[in-house]
Amino acid sequence: MDPTHDVDGPLGPEPVVTLVVAMRNERDHIEACLRSILDQDYPADRIEILVFDGGSTDGSRDVAERVLTDRPRAAVIENPRRIQAAAWNSGIDRASGDVIGIVSGHATLGRGYVRAAIDTLRRTGATMVGGPVRAIGEGIVAEAVALAVSTPFGVGGARFRYLDEEEEVDTVFMGLCRRDVYRRFPFDEEMVRNQDDELSYRILDDGGRIVCNPRIESSYRSRPTLATLWAQYFDYGFWKVRVIQKHPQQARIRHLVPAMLVAGLASTAVAARLWPPAAVAPMGYLAAVAVASVVAGGRRSPTIVPILALVYPILHLAYGLGFITGLIRHRRWPPGSRRSVLTALAGRTRHVGWRGRPADR
């Protein structure tokens, strides 16, 4: 048997790596994504590329097929369920690699991405590895978004978004695992968003370790408009409720902060009509936004500062409103039980565990 295919034993020097790319209407980004995979400083015959297209209508599939023409171990496949979790599960089922990595069609990989991931898996013995999110943007709004999501003020304790040294984290961007790990932990296809977040928590619940190494370099294109940014972070907040309900052991009070901010601003706005000094609280938040915008944007260009002053509140308020909406929509879990996400956050004394169904095949 080829030792590099001995999944239960040590990884060989250059194990086969399957990269599963999920895309839908990514015409503007998919070519750069795939060419960054083709340009890896890793033997081409040791990389399998599986692209799952969720019914693109903008010609993305044609672009992907053209870029991968005559490439060995590469295929473009239909994803009838359209969502990323379904694409990644299909890729995990089909993968022949000893190591599997998930890739977003919005991302581009650094040339040493695969080699650094293999080295980190082997050296640390981690269950999953990945790199930090390095957001980039085209245009002033996307640039401001990329900058904001790379700062603690913008994304709080999500350290995988801005750390500069290798460390253990609770989730990573585009995780890479040995094949047997992904086979034991398929993506939960209920999760339209936060599916990688939820899978990471299942790994942690099982006693696994997740390591983020900045040498596993990639970049991700930020949302180009404030409206699409709002929709993205509203969804993140909404689906975070389901993640916490399924994994109360991983819940942290910081997950409530955006919702508390929304509730606090709303209540003080009402109170200020009866007692004007109550307006100090929202003014304090706006002052913090202004300072953070100047600190983050001043080193770039003064023109980006006012855009940042809009982006930061969108990150916080959209996520908070999405979380509150999720609390209302998913008041009880499992259905009919008395357990709520607030119970999980308050106590975390009894581990509910994962009750998600296996992915549909």
Image (tube, grey):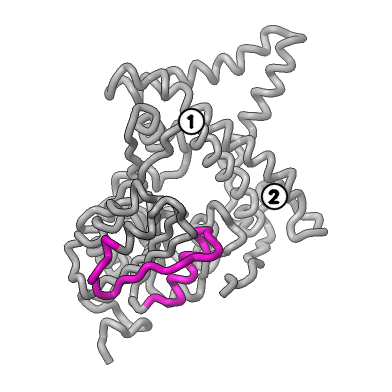
Q: Which residues are magenta?
A: 66-95
Residue 309: percent from left, percent from top: 45, 21
Residue 31 is a magenta residue: no
Q: Where does the C terminus fall, quadrant-wise?
A: bottom right
Quote the CA–CA distance across marks 1 and 2.
29 Å
Residue 73 is a magenta residue: yes
Q: Where does the N terminus fall, quadrant-wise?
A: bottom left
Decide which of tag 1 and tag 2 comes sooner along the chain. Answer: 1
Residue 112: percent from left, percent from top: 21, 58
Taking 345 as reference, is 149 left or right?
left
Q: Nearer the viewer, mark 1 or mark 2?
A: 1
Q: Looking at this rendering, what residue extends furthest in the top direction?
A: 276
Give the number of marks.
Answer: 2
Mark seen at residue 226: 1
Dot 2 falls on a residue whose secondary structure is helix
Dot 1 falls on a residue whose secondary structure is helix
Residue 164: percent from left, percent from top: 29, 44
Amino acid bearing label 2: Val
Mark seen at residue 328: none
Amino acid bearing label 1: Leu
For the point 81% across and 55% down, the residue is 338
Taking 76 as reference, is 68 left or right?
left
Image height of 165 relative to 195, above or below: above
Q: Few, some or many C-alpha atoms within 10 Å of disc 1 (few <14, some 14-19, many ≥20)? A: some
For the point 68% across and 52% down, the residue is 344
Mark seen at residue 341: 2
